[in-house]
Image: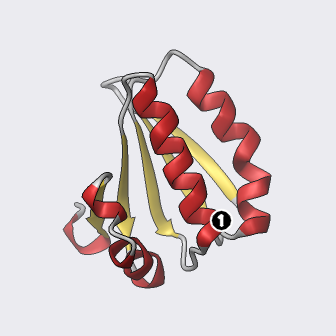
Amino acid sequence: MQIEHIQQPDDTLTLVICGDMDAQGCSEIQPQLDQLVNDETPKDITLDLHNVDFLDSSGIGAIVFLFKRLKAKGKALSLIQVHGQPMEIIQLLRINSAISVKPASTVS
């Protein structure tokens, strides 16, 4: 799994995730996520999941862990371009009741 960092003009950070958010992929990116949470520069983080076709419990765990750590620092997490199986899992587990989630069809 790979992450592309895109700094937005409003000081938020968009992370474009490419690959499956499974145990192996999440273990590869965990050090990067830890560093981002400890960084004081970006206010909020947006995960762009348009290149994520598979999400399992490890991926959900990484998202929830990131959300909780950011919230504790007064920052926000949102998910955009969510589609297919990842959207089904997020809705089934009601992650979208705590984290802003925008499906791929509603993002311009």
Horizontal side, residue 18 vs residue 64: left or right: right
- Residue at x 38% of width, y 55% of height: 79
- Residue at x 46% of width, y 84% of height: 85
Please tell me in which quadrant of the rendered image residue 91 appears: bottom left
Horizontal side, residue 38 vs residue 81: left or right: right
- Residue at x 64% of width, y 39% of height: 33
The residue pinned by badge 1 equals 58
Where residue 68 sits in the image (x, y, percent)? Answer: 47, 39
Where residue 59 sits in the image (x, y, percent)? Answer: 60, 64
The local crowd at label 1, few if under 14, some if 14 to 19, many if 20 or more residues have their Cα within 10 Å, is some
> How many numbered marks are there?
1
Nearest to the observer: residue 61 or residue 17: 61
Where residue 89 sits in the image (x, y, percent)? Answer: 44, 78
Q: Is residue 82 positioned above or below 2 on the image?
A: below
Q: Is any part of residue 14 visible from this angle?
A: no
Question: Which image quarter holds the N terminus?
Answer: bottom right
Where residue 92 sits in the image (x, y, percent)? Answer: 36, 79
Amino acid on which disc 1 is placed: Ser
